[in-house]
Amino acid sequence: MQVNKRHQVSPYLVFFIVYNSQVGVGILGFQRTIAAKAGYDAWMGVIVAGCFVQVFIWIMYKLLGKADGDIVDVHSKVFGNILGNVLSFIIMIYYWLASVSVLLGFIEIIQVWMFPTLPSWILCSLILVLVYYCVSGGFRVVVGVSFLSFLFPQITLIVLYIFPLKTAHFSNLLPIMNHSYKELFDAVKSSMYTLAGTEAFLMFYPFIRDPKSSKKFAHLAVLFTTFLYTVSAIVSFTFYSESQLKEKIWPELSLIKIIRLSYLERFEYIYISMYLVIVSSLLSLLLWCSTRGLKRIFKKKQKYFLIVISILSVVLSQLINEQYKETLDKYVTQMNLWIFYGYIPILLIIFILLKRSKQNG
């Protein structure tokens, strides 16, 4: 699929897109989840998960490079238009459900920490208006917001790890490797979903100018986010005991509460407000992927799907309570693992075999 050059972005911007796709609300609470699987050895699971994501990046480049298009093109070439569109539709639904999961997670944080009486639909509507504005501007606008989410506020937020390190107890990490391989594998699985997001690459690949030269930037982005998540886990593990961590739903937010400045006491309010930039950029990327795919499948304007999906997201924000949200998160996690780390590698093998058979024939 050919994309007009004026809609494409430079290869180095792939770093910021991949970073944006991986860093969301998950980093605020994943420490408790992985520690429940493998205790304070779980930081090693983050590194192993990062290695798996690096392999997945290589697989996606290989698959999309051979198809010279996005995942919709791959499915059409392998399975034909009808079955191919059905499979592509499933992936577009995943992108949408993933965006709903991120949105509801951030709304829950706002309601717990800042505005407990504010209805979900108001918060959801306000955030989606901003996201609609970004997505309707096109892919280059989405990439611009991704760049801003890295430059501001994430660089500033990384520096804030210095404060909890002042009272850190690195002895909490000892002894190393005192958990079974099964427990470590469970931590890897949990970390892989936390590091998820690179699958958005399956849709924006054609919008990269000279995709081959962008490969190194994609791998560097995954390396950086793996380092970021590993540092976040280690900082939390050295600050909290295991019994304390079990009681913290969002360990990183609780860490921010220790910051006291002479002119500011509740720094977490600013932290959460700044995080809106990060969440909005991630939602913009996921909804762009979903609506772009639906546009290609059904041959209708992208803005129509964006409006429908936004309305459905607001409705779901009202219907889904905490129990159903946990179920949604569970299904999104399973879809991510099975579709992208199981199905996509198999699809690459099938695509290579079909291409070889056509050449030999």
Image (cartoon, helix red, strand yellow):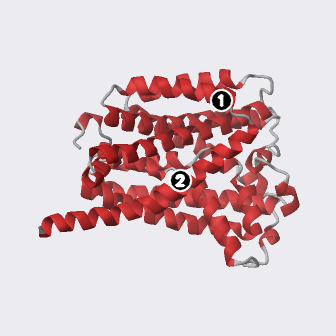
How many marks on residues? Answer: 2
Callout 2: 10 Å neighbours few (<14), some, many (20+)? many
Q: Which mark is residue 317?
A: 1
Q: Which mark is residue 336?
A: 2
Res 279 visible? yes
Q: Is residue 232 above or below residue 250?
A: below
Q: Position of residue 169 (x, y in %)?
A: 82, 65
Inspect the image, locate mark 1, and give the three-letter code of the amino acid beneath it: Ser
Residue at the spot x=43%, y=59% of the render?
A: 343
Q: Which secondary structure lies at badge 2?
A: helix
Quadrant that contains the C terminus: bottom left
Residue at the spot x=70%, y=37% of the render?
A: 271
Q: Is residue 167 above or below residue 175?
A: above
Q: Are marks 2 and 1 in contact (CB under 8 Å)?
A: no
Q: Is residue 259 above or below residue 174?
A: above
Residue sitting nearer the eye, 89 or 160: 89
Quadrant that contains the N terminus: top left
Which is more N-terminal, label 1 or label 2? 1
